[in-house]
């Protein structure tokens, strides 16, 4: 078995650099937050695993909000503009951030994308993060609301296994509820696990396919915007 | 909108440090690979999103292999030992690596865990990576086979959106095939997308719940072990 040499370990140099990156990100995020607030703009950062239904939820949300709220979207992906194409079909303005190998969005990416999108006249800005329950949790994007999605097909223990994503979120949204019975989803266990890591989080249940829970989710978003304007 | 200052950017210091980390990891992985090979040990690194069914597939695989092959498991998670508990119930030796905030396993973690597990007498070593389709793709663990899982509930476009995980894998396994009809899974599109980024990859389809495709998957693993012994 090869020995692990603890000396001359480049890993040791990662921590201070990461702290500097996160410190810079936090400062940029604070400036963004102040700017968003001064505009009365509600900004929502959506986090989840790949395939939990962020884009499907957003498409349906944009359709339901359209008569009442003007919403824009920044969408992050390592590769492809599939999600941006789906989102643009709703008529909402969308800017895609292609991250290549980077596993999360950061505040500087959001600042550039927001400048490209143009925020004037918007009530809401959705940020669809890279599909990843780990790295995005460490990057403040200046959002007013952070929302972690958990699809019923992923297993009820994911909040315990990826605690930071849920602990740092204002709301946890259970998605694909129309599949709950088919996959034997244990709703009580999932809620208990979310409560365990994020006792204060608002918990919502939706199906973007059937529309279940969309009214409650949109009301939650509307109340966030109303709060921003006071 | 806050300006993005390109100067004095700590991000710029990340790349050389990451390269040093990856270079060190590659060296450690090469040493591990030589050690595994000298033992005739087949080592399989499983990558996927959270909740794609790595543990469920492994539990069923360990049960089916048990009469014929001696297999051990190294399992990575940010938090909880839920998966290790499930895997140990099969009777296989299991070592858990708790990564905290680290979004992937690396070769040094595997070297330590392998020493703890003990490799004497094993035919196969499974490494269940952290649930993440981004970061684990960059870390060679000395494995002989890298396998990326895609559950039918995640959406057919994930190979295009997370290309490195699939491009660097020897096999792509479509999991939860028992749910394919319920979720309207487009098998042809998924296969075409895998082929697009990983033309040489072996594609397998399984359901750990019903047992569909398990014989083919176990035969694939057995042929890998047989190859190692020659």
Image (cartoon, coloured by chain):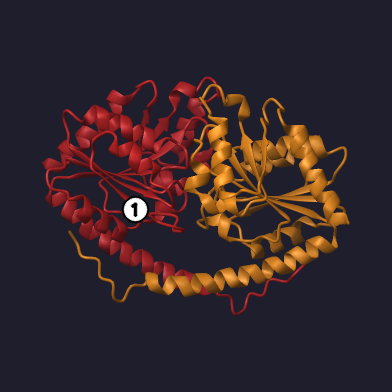
Chain colours: A orange, B red
Label 1 Cα neighbours within 10 Å, binned few <14 / some 14-19 / many ≥20: many
Quarter of the C terminus of chain A within the rendering: bottom right
Outermost residue on the bottom side: it is B8
Horizontal side of A117 relative to B119 (left or right) equals: right
Quarter of the N terminus of chain A within the rendering: bottom left
Q: Is residue B221 visible?
A: yes
Residue behind mark 1:
B97
Horizontal side of A136 relative to B214 (left or right) equals: right
Viewer-side residue, A51 vs A192: A192
Horizontal side of B35 relative to A88 (left or right) equals: left
From the viewer's perspective, is residue B218 above or below residue B210? below
Disc tally is 1
Q: x, y (%) of residue A155?
A: 49, 35
Viewer-side residue, B112 vs B173: B112
Q: Which residue does the image show at 35% across and 37% down from the upper left?
A: B86
The image quarter in which residue B135 lies: bottom left
Viewer-side residue, A15 vs A80: A15
Q: Secondary structure at mark 1?
A: strand
Q: x, y (%) of residue B75?
A: 33, 47
Q: Which residue does the image show at 29% across and 31% down from the upper left?
A: B61
Subunit bearing disc 1: B
Q: Is residue A90 visible?
A: no
From the viewer's perspective, is residue A75 above or below residue B193? below
Q: x, y (%) of residue B183?
A: 55, 24
Horizontal side of A218 relative to A85 (left or right) equals: right
The image quarter in which residue A228 lies: bottom right
Q: x, y (%) of residue A108?
A: 65, 65
């Amino acid at each position: 078995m090869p020995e692990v040499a603890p000396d001359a370990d480049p890993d040791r140099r990662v921590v201070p650099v990461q702290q500097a990156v996160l410190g810079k990100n936090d400062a940029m995020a604070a400036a963004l937050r102040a700017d968003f607030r001064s505009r009365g703009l509600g900004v929502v950062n959506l986090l989840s695993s790949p395939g939990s239904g962020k884009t499907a939820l957003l498409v349906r949300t944009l359709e339901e909000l359209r008569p009442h709220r003007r919403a824009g979207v920044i969408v992050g992906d390592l590769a492809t503009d599939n999600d941006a194409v789906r989102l643009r079909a709703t008529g909402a303005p969308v800017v895609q951030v292609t991250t290549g190998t980077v596993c999360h969005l950061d505040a500087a990416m959001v600042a550039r994308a927001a400048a490209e999108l143009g925020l004037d006249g918007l009530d809401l800005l959705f940020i669809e993060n890279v599909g990843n329950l780990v790295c995005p949790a460490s990057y403040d994007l200046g959002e007013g609301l952070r929302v972690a999605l958990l699809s019923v097909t992923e297993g009820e223990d994911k909040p315990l296994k990826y605690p930071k994503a849920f602990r740092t979120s204002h709301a946890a949204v259970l998605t694909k509820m129309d599949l709950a019975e088919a996959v034997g989803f244990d709703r009580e266990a999932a809620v208990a696990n979310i409560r365990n890591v994020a006792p204060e989080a608002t918990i919502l249940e939706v199906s973007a396919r059937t529309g279940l829970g969309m009214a409650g989710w949109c009301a939650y978003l509307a109340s966030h915007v109303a709060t921003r304007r006071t």
